[in-house]
Amino acid sequence: MKVFSSLALCLALLGCNVVANLDAVSAVKKASILRSDQFQSVAGNGKILLGVGSFGVIASSDDGGTNWKRTVLPGEASLIGLANCPDGSWVALDFYRKVWVADAAASKWEPRELSTKANPLAITCDAKGRYWVVGSRTTLLSSADKGATWASQDFGEDAILMSIQFIDADHAIITGEFGIVLTSADGGASWKPGKKIPNDFFPHATLFSDLRTGWVSGLAGVILHTTDGGDTWVKQPGGVGAPMYALVKHQGEMYAMGANGIVLKLTAGEWVPIEGRPAPYLRSALSLGEKGMLIAGGAGVLQIFSPGGQSPAPAAKK
């Protein structure tokens, strides 16, 4: 009898553990954000926020970042960039030479192939709703029909273009490996080489707040600043010796984010660390005004950060 009771108790305990484990697996499958997520880019259109990342993960929020809905694109996908167009629609850049497009509600995503052998690395959408993609081999792609067809330009150098920004409807800037700078003053109709950033600078991120004022972040945490449209660059002091992958202007202040989850703030001309996140890196940030900044990175970081204040708890991860 004792043997039977012990066996029954053992089976009962095992049964409970099996149920508990299955419940845990089910919870992970239903979670909107996982610790294994590697978010690369964020954007918003005034109604919803999106974060995209490796393995085709798209997280969306229609309540300002409090709750998130998870979508995983079919097939092989690795999303490394995201842009919102003037009509509210979305375009996400896939490292596997595709873009994924969606309407303003981001309810359905459709792939469009990139007509290039280059590796795409950054994307933006201009004031006319045209897509622009830059990448390896100094390649620039543009599409005026939401990715159905592409025009291609090759600037003839074996270098990687890392960023593209339309400062306004007419003026745009591209930065890349070896300090490459390309500029346009006619809405992208033509591009010309600008003065190179000194010392073969490799820019992780570039941000111009107006036609003359800009920053680039590079290796070992170096951040350069220009006040003359890129004719001259000055290294700003501070930092922590780690690369910064994102630059963002928030509430009139400049911030940099990068390796080891570090957040820097430009204070009296010096980059000062103000925050450390439990993440291998922070890759992207979006200012939400008084609500704070939406930040994204490794280890499933996708949350609202309030500089100088208490950050809301991150979305639950399993």
Image: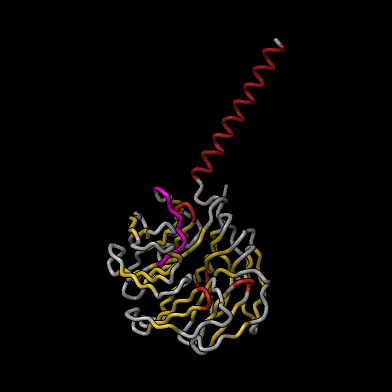
Q: Residue at image x 58%, y 55%?
A: 299
Q: Residue at image x 59%, y 26%?
A: 15
Q: Residue at image x 51%, y 83%?
A: 196
Locate residue 297 relative to residue 168 in the image: left or right. right
Nearer-the-camera pick, 62 or 222: 222
Residue 241 vertical placement versus 197 (above, below): above
Locate residue 96 relative to residue 286 in the image: left or right. left
- The span picked out in magenta is 75-83
Residue 99 vertical placement versus 74 (above, below): below
Nearer-the-camera pick, 144 or 138: 138
Nearer-the-camera pick, 61 or 212: 212
Check the picture and name the quadrant holding the N terminus. top right
Decide whether residue 198 is among the magenta residues.
no
Seen from this angle, which residue lies furthest right?
A: 2
Q: Residue at image x 67%, y 12%?
A: 4
User: How far across and down, in percent of the image, does residue 180 sit?
Assistant: 49, 78
User: How far across and down, in percent of the image, does residue 3 sit?
Assistant: 70, 12
User: How far across and down, in percent of the image, does residue 181 sit?
Assistant: 47, 80
Residue 182 vertical placement versus 114 (above, below): below
Q: How many marks?
A: 0
Seen from this angle, which residue lies furthest top?
A: 1
